[in-house]
Image: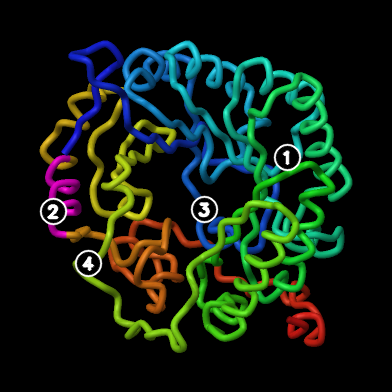
Amino acid sequence: MTLPIKNGWFGRKRHIRLYMDLSTTCDIRCVQCFREAIIPPPMKVTRAQLEILEREVFPYIERLSLSCTGEPLYLPIFPEALRAAKRAGVPYVRIQTNATHLDEAMSALLLDEGLSHLGVSLDAATKETFERIRVGADWEMVTGNIRRFVEMRNARRRVEPEVSLNFTLMTDNCHEALPLIDLARDLGVTSISYHHMIVERPEMKSHNLAYDPPRMNALLQSLREQAAARGVHVSVPKDLPDTITPWEGRLLEEPVYNGRCIAAEDSWMFLIPDGHCFPCLNLRDRFTLGNVFTTPFRDIWYGESNQAFRGEALRNQCARGCDHCKAVLTDDTGHELAYLAKRLTTRSATEIDRLKKPTSFPADLSLPTAAVNSL
């Protein structure tokens, strides 16, 4: 098993993929978001902590995501975080954003500082559906921001940052999955990532297409075909089996996932804003590998907990503490656990999450049956 070494040490190269958030906050409310089920504890990276990351962590990183679950562009510390990553020599830096703050000045900063990839979560191809799903975002502003960014990048005769769109497949927007391909071409975007919705609350099950495999598979095939015809690269989930194996419903006490662990294979590390590290975000309820603001990152990576987890995952395809891989569905796409948030399946995750007062999945989200069944 390879281990991280700073460039220039013994001829070895960096290879860790670090996924992190600078803050636990977001400025819009999306109906499929985990924030509809839990309240994340308020956390943010300080400037003093960013200096530690630049000095002690970023020099080991090959691919860095500066945002995973929070919105980065409206944070005052974001520009300095991007500069810190580039000063530390991180060769690939990406962000995921809702693009509400991707104005001309921010676009220029991303281009000037050498961002590698800009992912924009869109989830729709029309104003009506977009503003119903992504509450607080403005369709004209977001699409205009994307278009301007691509134009500014092209004016510099550059191919980076690559721009991609994200689309969460739900019964409520599936009729716009195909039109998004033409919208992407119009905006100058050449890549789209489609993915399943994770059920954050039981009442969200009826909005998840994974429970209707024939319909989902027909849509996935249409996406592949239309994208190929339009010259747009798409990432789509694997086809589903004819039926989904249901979860028994009892909270798991000691979950174990037997299958490929992409987090171990690709040397992932997840870092939350308070400095705690985890092999994967789906293991946050089980154990922390250490805190980068109090322990050298090298000691965390080489530490017994991290090496034991990765060793077992790589040798035996056994990820202890994981109920099912939700980040990348590689082999077993036919089990309900793949689409359920861990707080619904595992006792430790249920206990660690601070639940909001239960509310219903927005009743006005559902579209007319004719539109939903128009595949």
**Upstream in sequence: badge 2 or badge 3:** 3
**Upstream in sequence: badge 2 or badge 4:** 4
> Where, by quadrant of the figure, is residue 26 drawn?
top right
How far apart are the two marked residues, 3 and 4, measured between alpha carbons?
A: 30 Å
**Upstream in sequence: badge 3 or badge 4:** 3
**Upstream in sequence: badge 4 or badge 1:** 1
Q: Is residue 105 left or right of residue 212?
A: right
- How many neighbours does mark 4 have within 10 angstroms: few (below 14), some (14-19), or many (20 or more)? some
Does dot 4 land on a helix, a strand or a loop?
strand
Q: Which residue is mark 3?
A: 39
Q: Nearer the viewer, mark 2 or mark 3?
A: 2
Q: Which residues are magenta?
A: 307-316
Q: Position of residue 185 (x, y in %)?
A: 79, 49
Q: Position of residue 192 (x, y in %)?
A: 65, 52
- How many neighbours does mark 1 have within 10 angstroms: few (below 14), some (14-19), or many (20 or more)? many
- The answer to whether residue 138 is magenta is no
